Amino acid sequence: MTRSFLFHALCPAQFARDMTKLWHCDKLTRRCHSIITPYEIYTGFRALGFSILFSLGGLLIPVFFSYPTTLGHSWLPDPLFRIYTNHIHKAKHGSDTGIYDSDGHLRLALFDEMFDKMDSASTDGASDREPSLGVGDLFRLHSKTRVAADPAGWSFAAMEWWTTWLLLQREGRLWKEDLREMYDGTLFWKLRDRRNGRDCSMQGYGWKDWTNTMWYNGTWKSWEVHHNVDKEAERQPGVSALSLVAQEGQLLSQ
């Protein structure tokens, strides 16, 4: 199951005893050690730009995944709900894509196969574009990877895809190169640099995107509105973007 790099680093654990695990686990904790605390999970979400409420929701991660990683050295649960990264492979859940195996190794053939099978845009004839997955593709992928009698795995997979889409979407889609960088860890540095440089315009989806486009345009698909606004701005230089968004909303409501 692909998941946002935050989940790879902090919880469900496809990472075991290789450098992939260490690479991911080191990024948000800012230091190299084998324990991730709930506080570090919260600050990791906040560092990526997630809201306070969403970041507090991220504390469900140690609630569900602390004990499986504790089993590597004790039958007793950790009272502080810490996650032990040297045993993080024990928290791997079902109903995932299997792109990471139970030992934390990346299987690139399965990663490529996921896009070959699930990218509806390429199967519709748009073969000249970079492979990507839209919202509908993610629903189909989630349905395909579900296994019987695994409601926990279904739920974790859905939350992970949702978080990944909120973090990485561009034009409403998850692009193959972005996901590849998420898997190999290089995405961490780029997101950190963008946040530090206050460059948050490239990708992602937040409450402002939803509220602005729903209020002015009656749709949650902000990328479609922005695309139309950009084209209109080329025809009407000097007109504010807010005015163009409002005009777009009036056209959609007619």
Image (cartoon, rainbow, N blue to C red):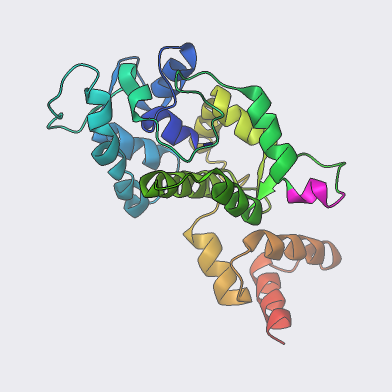
Nearer to me, 132 or 193: 132
Q: Residue shown at 15%/32% (left/top)?
A: 80
**Taking 19 as reference, is 40 above or below it?**
below
Which image quadrant is residue 18 in? Answer: top left
Image position, residue 181 (x, y; %)? 60, 28
Please state the total of marks drawn on the protein image. 0
Which residues fall within the magenta stretch? 120-125
Where 248 sits versus 136, above or below? below
Identified at 61% across, 34% down, the residue is 179
Between residues 55 and 131, which one lies in front from this camera angle? 131
Residue 4: % across, % down: 49, 38
Q: Quadrant of residue 225?
A: bottom right
Which residue is found at the position 30% from the left and 17% from the top? Answer: 34
Q: Position of residue 54 (x, y in %)?
A: 36, 51
Residue extending furthest toward the top: 18
Say left or right for 82 vs 111.
left
226 or 72: nearer the eye? 72
Q: Horizontally, is 94 left or right of 245 in the view?
A: left
- The C terminus is located in which quarter? bottom right
Magenta segment: does it hold 181? no
**Prevailing SS of the magenta stretch:** helix
Check the image and report above or below for 27 versus 230: above
Q: Give the farthest residue toward the front.
A: 148
- Residue 204, visible in the rendered structure: no
Evaluate whether residue 80 shows in this view: yes
Q: State the image quarter where residue 176 is shown.
A: top right
| x and y, in percent, of residue 53 in the image | 33, 54
